[in-house]
């Protein structure tokens, strides 16, 4: 394996997910890091998190598709470190829609971020690597280069382009002693899917069960790190990618795979099958099941009262310094248990929430309203979101209980990390940590009641 200590690593899209975890592995190996991302706030948080490794850090908030900005970055990095040894093109975005319904603007955006950004970085940093006859380039493609899922066509095309570019570079640059690794992640449980839209029953089920068959970003990051150490040309990440790759080579299998995916993932395709006898039978069975459920629980819902208390701290310039009391008292619950428990419903594990909130230094016992969603299946979270007013301004609290697994419920189910945003300016003014007291559990459970 290659010794990595002291090698300068540049990672795009490094503020979270795979990029941040990859940076962590290289930092542990003693590599100076150059990290870029378009999200300045998240990039600053990533920098603070990585400081504990005590390696040189250089961060820049920038658009990975801006060639001029990349050229300036190269100049500044060479002044700081003298070289870039390892370039990891990780920045990427997703989009789901049938190709005919994908606007040209979205095509351009996908190609700009997923393909051109990688090529721009290679174009700028490769000459210096060739001069030194040393370097390693990593390009993150996707398993959808093999499993070209209908309703994800434009995204698949952009990642296919990255894959072809990367694998050809790997052959051509070998004579310059430059390694190129193409990485094909399968499904990764990150915020990547947050901006995608479930338009069909198949997509809703896909997103709901995503944590069951996806990789954690840390797992993928480890494979990227190991692929660099081992100087691998291809990192498949998941055996399923190999399966889909070989299935793609067999035309009948590929056709069956594509048509089956389209049938369950496309809202239009499902609509076109509305008169199909089998579809009608399945639909009638589902309707009968939910009709029977409503007979047992005729449009019943529930309400339960919860208190979360802790402390918050204002962002500098938005309130008095130091830590202050933070507490919200909420009653939440769905109006319909049937919709609440139905994974095909838009109200799946989603309920209304209302009560009061106290934010030390800002307000006390102010009325608030919002929602609570139990996102166990999507990303192992519980998400609180509510709005309130104080001093003639409107604010929104967004809080999450995170990493909820069976083995850590006493902590994960009782600790909420949140922030408050000014709705007029969009600025985050405060961050908080609040807790549910375990001794309040009997009172919490005792407050449960059914409502009609």
Image (cartoon, rainbow, N blue to C red):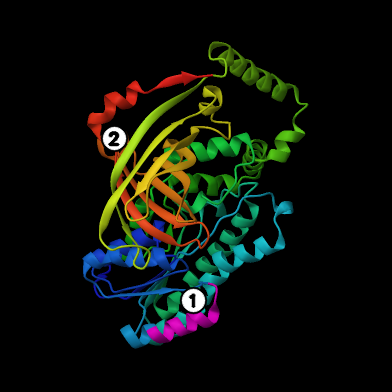
Q: Is residue 272 magenta?
A: no
Residue placed under numbered mark 2 in the picture? 409
Q: Position of residue 340 (x, y in %)?
A: 52, 28
> Height in image: 105 above or below 364?
below
Quarter that holds the C terminus: top right
Q: Quadrant of residue 165?
A: bottom right
In the rendered view, does 372 fall on the left or right side of 314?
right
In the rendered view, does 124 fall on the left or right side of 400?
right
| Number of the label disc, if any, that sits on residue 122 | 1
Q: Position of residue 98 (x, y in %)?
A: 69, 49
Q: Which residues are magenta?
A: 65-76
Dot 2 lies on which element?
helix
Dot 1 lies on which element?
helix
In the rendered view, does 136 fall on the left or right side of 29?
right
| Residue 29 visible in this rendered orientation of the protein | no
Q: For this rendering, which residue is in front, 129 or 62?
A: 62
Residue shown at the point (23%, 70%) measured from the top left: 30
> Height in image: 15 above or below 308?
below
Q: For this rendering, which residue is in front, 63 or 312?
A: 312
| Residue 2 visible in this rendered orientation of the protein | yes
> Counting residues from the N terminus, which is met first, the one under dot 2 or under dot 1?
1
Determine the residue located farthest toward the front in the rendered image: 391
> What is the distance, in whole Å, between disc 2 and disc 1 at their CAs?
45 Å
Magenta region, main secondary structure: helix
Q: Position of residue 325 (x, y in %)?
A: 28, 49
């Amino acid at each position: 394996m290659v010794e990595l200590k002291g090698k300068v690593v540049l990672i795009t899209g490094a503020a979270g997910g795979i990029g941040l975890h990859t940076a962590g592995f290289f930092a542990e190996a003693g590599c100076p890091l150059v990290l870029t991302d378009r999200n300045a706030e998240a990039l600053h948080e990533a920098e603070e998190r990585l400081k504990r490794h005590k390696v040189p850090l250089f961060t820049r908030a920038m658009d990975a598709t801006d060639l001029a900005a990349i050229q300036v970055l190269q100049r500044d990095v060479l002044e700081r470190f003298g070289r870039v040894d390892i370039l990891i093109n990780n920045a990427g975005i997703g989009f789901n829609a049938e190709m005919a319904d994908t606007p040209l603007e979205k095509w351009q955006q996908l190609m700009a971020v997923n393909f051109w950004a990688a090529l721009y970085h290679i174009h700028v940093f490769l000459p210096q690597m060739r001069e030194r006859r040393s370097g390693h380039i990593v390009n993150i493609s996707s398993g959808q280069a093999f499993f070209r899922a209908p309703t994800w066509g434009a995204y698949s095309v952009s990642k296919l382009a990255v894959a072809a570019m990367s694998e050809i570079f790997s052959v051509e640059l070998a004579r310059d002693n430059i390694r190129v690794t193409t990485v094909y992640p399968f499904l990764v449980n990150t915020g990547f899917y947050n901006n995608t839209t479930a338009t069909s029953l198949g997509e809703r089920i896909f997103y709901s069960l995503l944590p069951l068959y996806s990789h954690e970003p840390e797992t993928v990051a480890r494979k990227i790190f190991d692929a660099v150490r081992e100087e691998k040309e291809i990192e498949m990440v998941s055996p399923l990618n190999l399966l889909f790759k070989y299935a793609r080579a067999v035309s009948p299998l590929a056709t069956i795979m594509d048509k089956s995916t389209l049938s369950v993932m496309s809202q239009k395709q499902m609509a076109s099958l509305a008169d199909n006898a089998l579809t009608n039978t399945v639909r009638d069975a589902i309707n009968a099941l939910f009709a029977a459920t409503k007979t047992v629980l005729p449009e019943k819902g529930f309400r339960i009262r919860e208190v979360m208390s802790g402390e918050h701290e204002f962002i500098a310039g938005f309130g008095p310094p130091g830590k202050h009391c933070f507490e919200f008292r909420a009653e939440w619950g769905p109006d319909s248990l049937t919709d609440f428990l139905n994974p095909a419903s838009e109200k799946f594990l989603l309920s209304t929430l209302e009560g009061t909130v106290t934010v030390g230094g800002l307000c006390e016992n102010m009325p608030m309203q919002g929602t609570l969603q139990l996102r166990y299946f999507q990303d192992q979270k519980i998400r609180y979101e509510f709005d309130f007013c104080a001093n003639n301004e409107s604010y929104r609290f967004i809080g999450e209980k995170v990493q909820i697994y069976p083995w850590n419920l006493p902590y994960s189910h009782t600790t909420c990390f949140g922030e408050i945003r000014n709705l007029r300016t969009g600025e985050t003014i405060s961050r908080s940590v609040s807790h549910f007291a375990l001794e309040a559990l009997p009172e919490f459970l005792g407050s449960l009641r059914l409502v009609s």
